[in-house]
Image (cartoon, grey):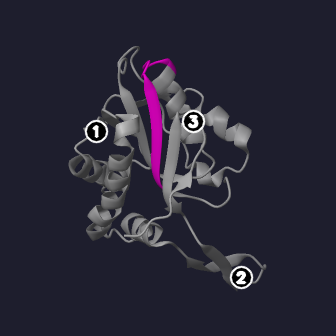
Amino acid sequence: MEINPQKIEGNWKEGWAMDLHTTSSIPKEKDEAGNVVKWDTIRPPIAEALYRLKYCSDISNVVSIAKPIADFLHEKQEQWNVNMIVPVPPSDTERAYQPVGELENAIAVLSKVPVDNTVLKKNESTPPLKTIDDPEARREILQDAFSVETDTLKGKNVMIFDDIYRSGETLNAVGEVITNQGNADNVYALTVTKTRAKR
């Protein structure tokens, strides 16, 4: 699957999204009040596969998404020397299956870099941040949302992984905790997609 990596900046040494989340999104239909209720959205191939995985329960897309990510990580390994993948815990714990969980396992198998989904704890439930526009409100919600035991990651080069980079607030909170509490040597970040606007 063709990708177009996008740099992402934050509380990590280097970070990348495999592609944009959408190429274009044009209003298609409005309700009586003039609010857009349908969009004509075009997505890059990996973003379309992620959309189908998350919202259409199309698990057949897991390997096709994970493969270019694992290949990208393989290219970076000489420089990064990642010895652990740490996924961002889900905000929606009610899903029958977790897309990030499915992807992280596939990436671990393909890249031969182990995943640890127990080291990073989510201390409290948080609302989906895509519903909150104010960056300060997002930071406040995430202030004590994550934790790791002190020195758990000492001596480790950690790659944090999530499906979508929007504002970057969640990944920033995770990167800070892994660096300051976990004392990881180096932190890197990979996501499947990156939104065109930081919201």
The image quadrant that residue 25 belongs to is bottom right
| Depicted 41 relative to depicted 68: above or below | below
The secondary structure type at the circle numbered 1 is loop
Q: In this picture, which residue range is highlighted in magenta?
A: 180-192
Which residue is most to the top? Answer: 150
Q: Position of residue 137 (x, y in %)?
A: 70, 39
Picture disc at residue 115: 1
Which residue is most to the front? Answer: 78
Query: For mark 2, what is the residue?
Result: 31
Amino acid carrying label 1: it is: Val
Does 113 appear in magenta? no
The secondary structure type at the circle numbered 3 is helix
Q: Position of residue 32 (x, y in %)?
A: 75, 84
Q: Counting other residues with Cα less than 10 Å from the Cα at mark 1, is it few (<14), some (14-19), or many (20 or more)?
A: many
Amino acid carrying label 2: it is: Asp
Cα distance between the residues tagged 3 and 1: 19 Å
Query: For mark 3, what is the residue?
Result: 172
The secondary structure type at the circle numbered 2 is loop
Picture disc at residue 80: none
Q: Residue at x 26, y 69 (%)?
A: 60
| Depicted 187 relative to depicted 155: above or below | below
Q: Counting other residues with Cα less than 10 Å from the Cα at mark 3, is it few (<14), some (14-19), or many (20 or more)?
A: some
Counting residues from the start of the chain, the first of labels 1 and 2 encountered is 2
Res 147 visible:
no
**Depth check, front residue: 166 or 158:** 158
Q: Residue at x 65, y 40 (%)?
A: 138
Left or right placement of residue 123 versus residue 27 in this view: left
Tell us which disc is closer to us: 1 or 2: 1
**Depth check, front residue: 153 or 70:** 70
